[in-house]
Image (tube, grey):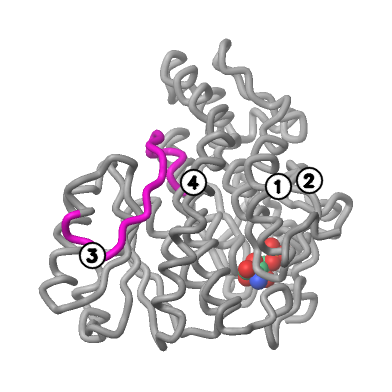
Amino acid sequence: EKGGYEHFMLKEIYEQPRSIYDCMRGRIYPLEGKVQLGGIKEYTEKFKNAQRIIIVACGTSWHAGLVGEYLIEEYARIPVEVEYASEFRYRNPIINENDIVIAISQSGETADTMAAIEMAKEKGATIFGICNVVGASIPRLSHAGIYTHAGPEIGVASTKAFTAQVTALTLMAFYMAETKGTIAKSKLIGLLSELERIPKLVEKALQSDQYILSIAEKFKDVRNALFLGRGSGFPVALEGALKLKEISYIHAEGYPAAEMKHGPIALIDEEMPVIVIATKNSSYEKVISNIQEVKARKGVVIAIVTEGDTEVTKMADYSIEIPHTDEAFLPLIATIPLQLLSYHIAVLRGSNVDQPRNLAKSVTVE
Ligand code: M6R
């Protein structure tokens, strides 16, 4: 049932070209510049008039939410807040009938996320669910929503569910942008044609697997790791750090690259790898200065770079190439090498990758 793979996690990492495709299948029409989301169609007016959107989730799903914030604000121009469900539910949040709450959950059973939407619903908000497990509690509690269609995820560490959540949020952001008229038709046509290519690009990113294994062999015994990114590369950094800590038990932190000098820079030495999302996009030059800061302190840099890059490659100790894509889709590609890196480090350390200690696949108690 692992389809020839040693672990479910590896199988699920490799399933991503397919799961991302399944998430967008029948929902995008690149030639016409149209997105169709049956699940939320009745609520088009609601999105048109939305003053703000609150995203609630936990763990990896919360990271997907941060990517969603970036996309919805960029394209649909609706203000977004991303909240840990556990914090949101115990505050006395200001919510009214004009608010849209999007709950993201692979399992659809996470206790804190459920409680958060129950509360928001009571206060009159409209609830949308982005879930993977069909018919789970969160979809049943929501007014509407869309399924991610990633297929069953068995590994406790979320991989294909994350990229499917990001794909679903991308579709929602484009859908809202289209209905609100905040995106030009020609721009949307271009973005949707690129989105259609993403499964192929993910396949390409997976080809660095052996090289990533060789990096994992060098770093398997480290005690700490720092992940840095800017823009939508920041949630990718958070996700990379979470993946590493949960399956390899190495302490890892994700930070916005510019925040490094406000504290974490003190940790940098020859021992600690700093994994940097340094692809060619709007923050490229800024990230290069951050890498220089790490190198000046004798830090070890593992960079995720755009294919053909020479500038970062010169400075970094190791560079993992990913294919170029529009900045909107960067998280879908840049996450892949980080999943593989964590996987290989965890296997080399002898951890139980699919069922890491102390963790459950769905957290149904708070
Ligand atoms: O099922 P959910 O998406 O609601 O689960 C949320 C988190 O428990 C989950 O993402 C957790 O952080 C994963 N183990 C991360 O890999």
Q: Secondary structure at mark 3?
A: helix
Q: Which residue type carries mark 3?
A: Ala
In the figure, is residue 211 to the left or right of 258?
Answer: right
Quadrant location of the C terminus in the rendered image: bottom right
In percent of the image, x 39 and y 76: which residue is there? 218
Between residues 53 and 309, which one lies in front from this camera angle? 309
Earlier in the chain: of badge 2 and badge 4, it is: 2
As measured in the structure, the alpha-carbon distance from the residue carrying label 2 to the one carrying label 4 is: 37 Å
Which mark is in front, 2 or 4? 4
Earlier in the chain: of badge 1 and badge 4, it is: 1
In the figure, is residue 136 to the left or right of 149?
Answer: right
* Residue 340 in the image, given as x and y percentages of width and height: 53, 62
In percent of the image, x 59 and y 34: which residue is there? 171
* Residue 139 in the image, given as x and y percentages of width and height: 81, 51
Q: Which residue type carries mark 2?
A: His
Earlier in the chain: of badge 2 and badge 3, it is: 2
Residue at which label 4 appears: 205
Q: Dot 1, crowdedness within 10 Å: few (<14), some or many (≥20)? A: many
As measured in the structure, the alpha-carbon distance from the residue carrying label 1 to the one carrying label 2 is: 6 Å
Q: Dot 3, crowdedness within 10 Å: few (<14), some or many (≥20)? A: some
- Which corner quadrant of the figure contains ligand 1? bottom right
In percent of the image, x 26 and y 86: which residue is there? 267
Using the image, determine if residue 162 lies above or below residue 290. above
Residue at which label 3 appears: 258
Residue at which label 2 appears: 143
Which mark is in front, 1 or 3? 3
In contact (CB < 8 Å): disc 1 and disc 2: yes
Residue at which label 1 appears: 128
- The residue furthest top is 32
Q: Dot 4, crowdedness within 10 Å: few (<14), some or many (≥20)? A: many
Between residues 102 and 197, which one lies in front from this camera angle? 197
